[in-house]
Image: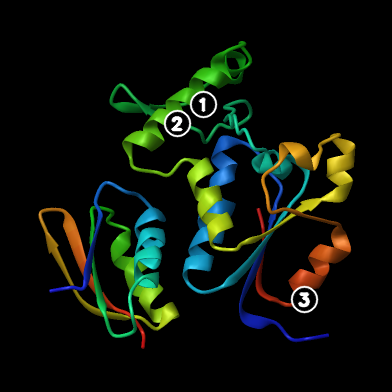
Amino acid sequence: MSSPDTNTMSIIVTKGSLDWAYPPFILGTTAAAMGLEVTMFFTFYGLNLLMKDLSLQVSSLGNPAMKMPMMGMHMGMPNIVSAIPGVDAAASKMMKNLMKKKGIAPIEDLRELAVEADVRMIACQMTMDMFEYGTEDMIEPLEIGGAATYIEVATQSHINLFI
Amino acid sequence: MADQVLDAKGLNCPLPILKAKKALKSLEGGQTLEIQSTDPGSVADFAAFCRTTGNELVEQSDTDGVWTYLIKKAG
């Protein structure tokens, strides 16, 4: 087994909501900009981030730490309100507006930068099957692999993150 | 005078770094890039970026909420 190269990083991406899309793509693109070879392995809801058409949403349901700046204070959302149809869509729109105002890149842009920076992207075969996703709906270039594919990458990576 | 100037004002993490990296790509070793940023996090981030990549942070200044960095591309 080869020893890890200090200039390599892998990230397992398991979540596909608007908020959780940021950590893997921010760290992946930044690591690539700092000269690291980066591999991202998308599994379960993370597969959602590989779709050509992204319609990412955030949910305040069961997320008591989500407090948006509103009317001069920070407001959370009780679960009973979050459960009302349309509330998640409104909260997502509000978060996207906030991001735009603060100069935060849309996920589409960060993802494109990751592709440009030759970040290796692997989609998990098993969860692709389970959710009946096809590569035709996903961005290119994309590799398909399983646990062993990831483990091989991990054994050769200095930094391995699970997000 | 820097060989190239990058206006990253109004952009938030990690965009100033990503755009700086792109701009540095087009420069030769020894040439300089000036970056203007309004992101307070850029102070720590450009220092870390330079330490890791070997590019030299020649100088930095701060005027009216705009941080200016001069980076010399590693040769």
Q: Which quarter shows the N terminus of chain B?
A: bottom left
Pick the residue in front: A94 or A100: A100
Secondary structure, mark 2, is helix
Whether residue A68 is visible, yes or no, is no
Image x and y of residue B22, in percent: 40, 64
CA–CA distance between discs 3 and 2? 37 Å
Q: Is residue A29 above or below residue A96?
A: below
- SS of the residue under disc 3: helix
Q: Is residue A79 left or right of residue B34?
A: right
Separation of marks 1 and 2 at Cα, in angstroms: 6 Å
CB-based contact (under 8 Å), mark 1 and mark 2: yes
Q: Residues within 10 Å of mark 2 (few under 14, many from 20)?
A: many
Give the SS element for disc 1: helix
Which of the marked residues, 3 or 1, is nearer the chain's N terminus? Answer: 1
x and y, in percent, of residue A28 in the image: 56, 60
Instruction: Tell me how the rendering is colored.
Output: rainbow
Task: Specify the subunit that label 3 lies on.
Answer: A
* Residue that carries the numbered disc 1 in the rendered image: A92
Q: Residue at x 16, y 53 (%)?
A: B65
According to the picture, the residue beneath numbered tag 2 turns out to be A96
Image quadrant assignment for residue A37: bottom right
Q: Quadrant of residue A105?
A: top left
Whole-percent x, y for residue A17 in the image? 62, 36
Position of A104 relative to A149 (above/below): above
Callout 2, which amino acid?
Answer: Lys
Amino acid type, residue under disc 3 in the picture: Thr
